[in-house]
Amino acid sequence: MKTDIETTDLERRGRNVDAALPSPAPTLFEVAHRGGIWEVTKDGRFYGHYHSQQPAFDAVEAAAHAAVASGGSADILLRGERPCRETDAAFTSR
């Protein structure tokens, strides 16, 4: 007498193991100019205060690159006034 026994992998039952996992939410960096200070947050938490815009943007750029290099993604959001670029200053001083 032959008996067929069916085995089941309980960990895989009911889900498609070949389906791609959803990608994690991107890291959100926000830059804002408030009261003469450039404030940077990462996912809503304090990241740094800077006295001028260039160091703030350099820090955000480096942190965003690090997030991407580790397999994640990053978004950068500028809140408030538009940062002044050297070319903008040249046009307004003429």
Image (spheres, helix red, strand yellow):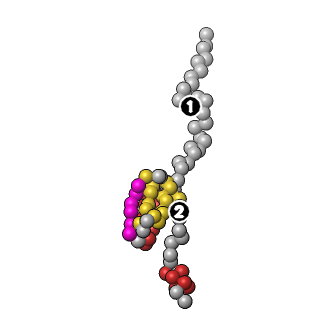
Q: Earlier in the sequence, mark 1 or mark 2?
A: 1
Residue at 58 percent of width and 18 percent of height? 5
Vertical side of 50 occupied by 74: above or below: above
Q: Please state, as top left, top right, bottom left or bottom right, where the N terminus lies in the image.
A: top right
The majority secondary structure of the magenta stretch comes to: strand
Q: Amino acid at mark 1?
A: Arg
Q: How many neighbours does mark 2 have within 10 angstroms: few (below 14), some (14-19), or many (20 or more)?
A: few
Residues at marks 1 and 2, CA–CA distance in whole angstroms: 45 Å
Q: Quadrant of residue 60?
A: bottom left
What residue did someone put label 2 on? 79
Q: Nearer the viewer, mark 1 or mark 2?
A: 2
Residue at 54 percent of width and 26 percent of height? 10
As drawn, the residue found furthest toward the top would be 1
The stretch drawn in magenta includes residue 78:
no
What residue did someone put label 1 on? 12
Vertical side of 13 occupied by 48: above or below: below
Q: Please state, as top left, top right, bottom left or bottom right, where the C terminus lies in the image.
A: bottom right
Residue 32 appears in the picture as rendered: yes
Residue 55 appears in the picture as rendered: no
Residue 24 x %, y %: 53, 48
| Region in magenta | 46-51
Q: Secondary structure at mark 1?
A: loop
Residue 18 x %, y %: 59, 41
